[in-house]
């Protein structure tokens, strides 16, 4: 015969302070755990959704990033004329020969300088990225010293708003538009005409070639042809895969750092839960003896105390998740170690993170309650009643 759940709830309510302190400690641990997962997911979402399965990125073989890649004009022309590359409405190839440079800009809030990625795009650059839209001002004119800034850049850096002037590459560039890329990596970039930027930085080569394929299923044929061509020293990747790889180093750092912090904090929370449960057993020795005398088995006593510990963990998990959910209103920026430029992204909460966080909280409750529950189950009936 099981012990009614109301009995466990009354015992938790009777010890309000210890219940609140124990659940609060677990809530803080779950908050840290969930926040780290949200940070990692936000980074992954920002970079992965930057790319499209229909697009391919061609860079120098083994370059790893566009910043380190070099493609000369002859090679770029070969790439954009591959049969798998789609044509636009005007009959022109849907390809953008792009150049990437890093400049240093000063932040509005701290007056500290940070690296910002400048992307020189071809005339089809916007058409290849349907997630990018101009939300203020207009698109830059080809062949001019005009640029557009990502929404995140415009908000955080001096000189990046519409009508303002940025000086780099020994030239002055007028910001004529702000683009919103739907919280993808392009929000942390500045775009301009590729040929103008190459002249300004005296770069005779491109960094990458972005092409739209007729069919994503034709990527393998495109990749094999590019990488087997003896005239080329290039490699091709689907755009979403390319950007997913860009997030690996930073995502792994966040994951491992968060795991270490969560383990350290969880040890403290588990110890707190264990102390609480041991104290509960000590104060309820007579009750436990009475329950045993009434015919409740040791396994039932064990289960009752484990349920109590699980309730503490569940309460902490729910509160921790509620607190973590508010982090979605914040945007943070950090150095992308692949491109060496600053990347802004938001905390992202999803069903998987909720499930993992609640499971983590319940595990803390079980680990913290199993030994006190076992002690309660082992108490002898006569000794327990005699303690009264």
Image: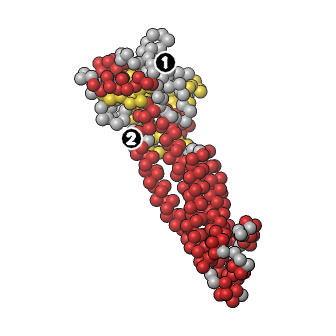
Q: Residue at x 55, y 36 (%)?
A: 183
Q: Position of residue 260 (x, y in %)?
A: 46, 59
Q: What is the number of callouts on the image?
A: 2
Q: Which residue lies most toward the top here? A: 90
Please state the horizontal and vertical placement of residue 196, each as a whole percent of the image.
Answer: 39, 21
Using the image, tell me which numbered label, if any, was put on residue 114: none
Residue 360 in the image: x percent, y percent? 56, 58
Residue wearing tag 1: 141
Is residue 9 placed above or below 335 in the rendered structure? below
Is residue 128 visible in this depiction of the protein? yes
Asked whether, in this view, residue 333 is left or right of residue 295, the answer is left
The crowd level at tag 1 (other Cα within 10 Å; few <14, some 14-19, many 20+) is few
Q: Which of disc 1 and disc 2 is earlier in sequence?
A: 1
Q: Quadrant of residue 57?
A: top left
Which residue position holds label 2? Answer: 338
Q: Nearer the viewer, mark 2 or mark 1?
A: 2
């Amino acid at each position: 015969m099981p012990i009614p759940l109301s009995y466990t709830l009354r015992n938790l309510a009777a010890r309000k302070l210890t219940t609140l302190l124990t659940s609060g400690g677990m809530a803080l641990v779950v908050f840290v755990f969930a926040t780290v997962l949200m940070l990692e997911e936000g980074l992954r979402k920002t970079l992965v959704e930057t790319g499209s399965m229909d697009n391919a990125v061609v860079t120098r073989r083994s370059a790893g990033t566009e910043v380190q890649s070099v493609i000369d004009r002859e090679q770029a022309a070969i790439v954009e004329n591959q049969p798998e590359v789609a044509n636009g409405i005007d009959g022109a190839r849907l390809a953008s020969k792009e150049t990437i440079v890093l400049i240093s800009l000063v932040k509005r809030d701290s007056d500290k300088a940070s690296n910002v990625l400048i992307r020189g795009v071809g005339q089809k650059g916007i058409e290849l990225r349907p997630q990018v839209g101009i939300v203020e001002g207009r698109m830059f004119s080809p062949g001019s010293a005009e640029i557009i800034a990502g929404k995140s850049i415009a908000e955080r850096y001096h000189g990046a708003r519409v009508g303002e002037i940025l000086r780099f590459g020994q030239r002055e560039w007028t910001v004529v538009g702000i683009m919103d890329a739907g919280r993808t990596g392009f929000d942390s970039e500045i775009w301009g005409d590729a040929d103008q930027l190459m002249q300004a930085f005296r770069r005779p080569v491109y960094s990458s070639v972005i092409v739209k394929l007729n069919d994503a299923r034709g990527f393998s044929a495109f990749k094999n042809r590019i990488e087997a061509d003896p005239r080329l020293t290039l490699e091709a990747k689907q755009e979403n895969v390319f950007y997913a790889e860009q997030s690996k180093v930073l995502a792994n750092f966040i994951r491992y750092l968060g795991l270490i912090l969560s383990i350290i904090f969880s040890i403290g929370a588990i110890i707190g839960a264990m102390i609480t449960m041991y104290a509960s057993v000590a104060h309820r020795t007579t009750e436990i003896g009475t329950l045993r005398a009434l015919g409740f088995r040791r396994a039932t006593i064990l289960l009752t105390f484990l349920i109590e510990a699980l309730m503490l963990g569940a309460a902490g998990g729910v509160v921790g998740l509620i607190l973590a959910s508010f982090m979605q209103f914040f945007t943070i920026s950090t150095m992308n170690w692949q491109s060496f430029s600053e990347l802004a992204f938001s905390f992202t909460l999803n069903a998987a993170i909720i499930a993992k966080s609640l499971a983590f909280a319940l595990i803390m409750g079980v680990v913290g309650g199993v030994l006190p529950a076992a002690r309660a189950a082992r108490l002898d009936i006569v000794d327990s009643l005699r303690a009264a």
